[in-house]
Amino acid sequence: MAISTHGHIVSVNSKVVGDLQSLGSIKQKRALKEYEAINSGVIVQALGNIKTDPITMSVLYNPADILGAGELEAAFLAGTIVPFSIELSDKILTTGTTFAWTGAVISDFEVNQETDGDVLATFSVALNGAPTVTAAA
């Protein structure tokens, strides 16, 4: 069964971010270093730690929001490290699969005025290492 994108839950500092308009990919990777012997052509590959690329998300901007979007803005302004999680939608089970990081930094904050009158806030979340993944239950 596929997972629907409608209904994802993003939390920052244990506060749910509402009115998500877009949510970037969860991309993990390892640094790769290769050592090539000059006398035999043998190649040894060494892998580094798992890293997660920054995730970009957009929300409807409300400067009076004290919940998740306000928490994202406050973390950006203060330069603080916050816990961050994404719960994938799963309407059949009680909770979806959750990706959680103990430390995230909001590295970018951008406000865009849309032609229909709404304002979008776009945030980039820099994440520390691999997430803790909790399967849907």
Image: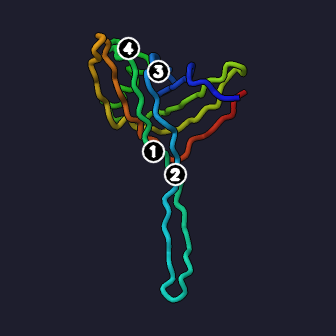
Residue 47's x, y, as percent?
54, 62
Q: Residues within 10 Å of mark 3 (few under 14, many from 20)?
A: many
Q: Nearer the viewer, mark 3 or mark 1?
A: 1
Q: Identify which amino acid the numbered label 3 is placed on.
A: Val
Of callouts 2 and 3, which one flags the residue occurring earlier in the amino acid sequence?
Answer: 3
Residue 10's x, y, as percent?
51, 25
Q: Identify which amino acid the numbered label 4 is placed on.
A: Asp
Please, what secondary structure does the residue beneath circle 3 have?
strand
- The one nearer the camera, 28 or 11, is 28
Task: Kindly identify which residue carries mark 4.
Answer: 65
Task: Kindly identify which residue carries mark 3.
Answer: 17
The structure residue drawn at horizontal position 50% and vertical position 78%, both measured from the top left corner, is 36
Of callouts 4 and 2, which one flags the residue occurring earlier in the amino acid sequence?
Answer: 2
Q: Nearer the viewer, mark 4 or mark 1?
A: 1
Task: Kindly identify which residue carries mark 2.
Answer: 29
Quadrant containing the C terminus is: top right
Please, what secondary structure does the residue beneath circle 4 have?
loop
Q: CA distance from mark 3 to mark 4?
A: 10 Å
Task: Kindly identify which residue carries mark 1.
Answer: 53
Asked whether, in this view, residue 69 is left or right of residue 10, the answer is left
The structure residue drawn at horizontal position 49% and vertical position 45%, both measured from the top left corner, is 52
